[in-house]
């Protein structure tokens, strides 16, 4: 399997290279040159598989023999060691033909553990074989950071530096990162917002000369192909649990960087009968505006009570654009250049293709809280604010009540006490036992200005 850039000008890579590379040299994102297509019969034959066994069959075509089956199996097994639910991704019903898929039973209580537990073990295995060490550098608006740190804290061949916007992440989110005191883990609070953090990361990747010889950066943000790939699996898992593939299914996905929902799109392209993919956003609604009114322009960032979706730009949307424009890298480059200078507008053909699959909705904080309350009142289900946005969007956008809709429950409510205290009884958002003393644990992190030389100085000192 080869991987190509969405902007058409970077070298083709194999799986391992794509995992280690992150952003392509031409500024694009790597995607598989072609997707595996599974027949209905083949998918149906997976009904008996455990989550881990299912993951093996879904990801094997992408890895394409570069990692031997026995080793891949082991990497997958290790990736779910830290999950605290036997089903890994259990379904809970919250309305007629309406379900939530709980993706928060991993070590950091958010769905990002699915991708980042896997990526950590995958990187360590690849690097051990290459006798190489790498530096993970990433930015987080909250959940990515802790999931990446948990994924890498025991890696022999990785040092990890995670930037978060100073005083812009919840105490629980910050402490899930800063209380990991491993020697290879470095937390940095930047005086700026999430996009400032992302820009610092981008600049560092573009010019890595600040690193000592032989050192190299690797990205674990949601543009990393291995993350998207790992997330495809739970779409199959949920569909199989609800009678797929002989029955179509819809998904509603709380969306920020468009990584999670893009994995759902890929599952559909790979043969899973997905009827609707519902993009659920908060006030940072660039994707909703794009789909509804062809308005893909940057707006000021709004800080919401669903902070893990507070973004101005959805990086993975570029991967969808590439498909909407018949995989023409030159057109994608042109669109992204337009967007750099303010906004891009899609062709009617591209928009209508997107609308065939995707619907969208946007919720403000009040509507999010109202949904948390009404879901709790009607089912006693405690949804976190991100999950609530997904549930509300599903209810607004569903085109067919006969098709089951699965709402991705992307985080545990205890991660977002600011919203939970306003909408749920206290007993519903307690931290689980393994994190119950989180607020008392010692922390370690560095506060820096929004300035790349200060960042590079700190990294050099600690490597
Ligand atoms: C990251 C995150 C999202 C958004 O996921 P994307 O892949 O960026 O669209 C939604 N909810 C929670 C809780 C998250 O941590």
Image (spheres, rainbow, N blue to C red):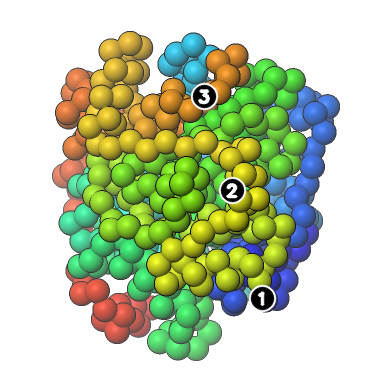
Secondary structure at badge 3 equals loop
x then y, percent, for residue 78: 56, 45
Tag 1 residue = 10
Task: Classify residue 226 as left or right of residue 190.
Answer: right
CA gap, disc 2 to disc 1?
Answer: 26 Å
**Residue 84 appears in the figure:** no
Q: Please identify, in this view, whether the residue under mark 2 or under mark 3 is nearer the observer.
A: 2
**Along the horizontal axis of the image, is 382 left or right of 81?**
left
Of the two numbered discs 2 and 1 in the rendering, the one whose residue sits closer to the viewer: 2
- Looking at the image, do the residues carrying marks 3 and 1 touch, with CB atoms under 8 Å apart? no
Badge 1, how many Cα within 10 Å: few under 14, some, many 20+?
some
Q: Which callout, 2 or 1, points at the residue further toward the start of the chain?
A: 1
Residue 398 rendering spot, x and y as whole percentages: 52, 24
Q: How far is the residue under mark 3 from the one under mark 1?
A: 39 Å
Residue labelled with disc 2: 351
Residue placed at 30% from the left, 41% from the top? Answer: 306
Which element type, helix, strand or loop, lies under badge 1?
loop
Are the residues tagged 2 and 1 within 8 Å (C-beta)?
Answer: no
Classify mark 2: helix, strand or loop.
helix
Q: Which of marks 3 and 1 is in front?
A: 3
Tell me if the residue at label 2 has its CB under 8 Å from ligand 1: no
> Which residue is labeled 3 in the image?
398
Identify the residue at horizontal 64%, vertical 67% (top origin). 331
């Amino acid at each position: 399997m080869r991987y190509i850039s969405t902007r058409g000008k970077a070298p083709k890579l194999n799986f391992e290279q794509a995992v280690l590379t992150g952003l392509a040299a031409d500024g694009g994102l790597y995607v598989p040159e072609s997707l595996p297509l599974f027949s209905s019969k083949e998918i149906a034959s997976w009904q008996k598989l455990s989550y881990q066994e299912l993951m093996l069959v879904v990801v094997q075509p992408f890895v394409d023999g570069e990692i031997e089956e026995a080793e891949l199996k082991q990497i997958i097994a290790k990736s779910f060691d830290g999950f605290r639910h036997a089903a890994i991704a259990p379904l809970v019903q919250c309305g007629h033909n309406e379900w939530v898929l709980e993706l928060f039973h991993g070590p950091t209580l958010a769905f990002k553990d699915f991708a980042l537990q896997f990526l950590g073990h995958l990187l360590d295995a690849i690097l051990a074989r290459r006798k190489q060490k790498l530096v993970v550098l990433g930015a987080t608006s909250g959940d990515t950071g802790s999931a990446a740190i948990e994924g890498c804290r025991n890696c022999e061949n990785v040092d990890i530096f995670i930037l978060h916007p100073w005083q812009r992440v919840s105490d629980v989110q910050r402490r899930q990162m800063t209380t990991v005191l491993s020697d290879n883990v470095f937390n940095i609070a930047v005086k700026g917002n999430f996009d400032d953090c992302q820009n610092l990361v981008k600049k560092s990747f573009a010019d890595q000369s600040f690193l000592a010889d032989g050192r190299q950066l690797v990205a674990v943000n949601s543009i990393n192909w291995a993350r998207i790939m790992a997330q495809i699996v739970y779409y199959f898992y949920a569909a199989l649990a609800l009678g797929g593939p002989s029955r179509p299914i819809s998904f509603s996905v709380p969306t920020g960087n468009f990584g999670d929902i893009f994995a759902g799109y890929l599952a559909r392209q790979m043969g899973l009968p997905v009827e609707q993919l519902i993009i659920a956003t908060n006030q940072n609604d660039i994707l909703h505006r794009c789909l509804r009114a062809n308005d893909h322009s940057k707006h000021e960032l709004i800080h919401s009570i669903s902070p893990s979706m507070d973004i101005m730009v959805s990086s993975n949307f570029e991967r969808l654009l590439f498909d909407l424009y018949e995989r023409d890298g030159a057109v994608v480059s042109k669109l992204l250049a337009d967007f750099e200078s303010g906004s891009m507008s899609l062709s009617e053909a591209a928009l209508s293709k997107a609308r065939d699959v995707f619907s969208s909705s946007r919720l403000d904080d009040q509507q999010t809280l109202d949904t948390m309350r009404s879901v709790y009142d009607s089912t006693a289900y405690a949804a976190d604010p991100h999950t609530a946005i997904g549930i509300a969007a599903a209810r607004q956008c569903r085109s067919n009540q006969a098709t089951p809709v699965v709402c991705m429950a992307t985080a545990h409510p205890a991660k977002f006490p600011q919203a939970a205290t306003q909408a749920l009884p206290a007993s519903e958002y307690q931290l689980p036992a393994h994190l119950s003393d989180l607020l008392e644990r010692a922390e370690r992190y560095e506060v820096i200005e929004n300035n790349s030389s200060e960042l590079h100085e700190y990294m050099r000192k600690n490597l």
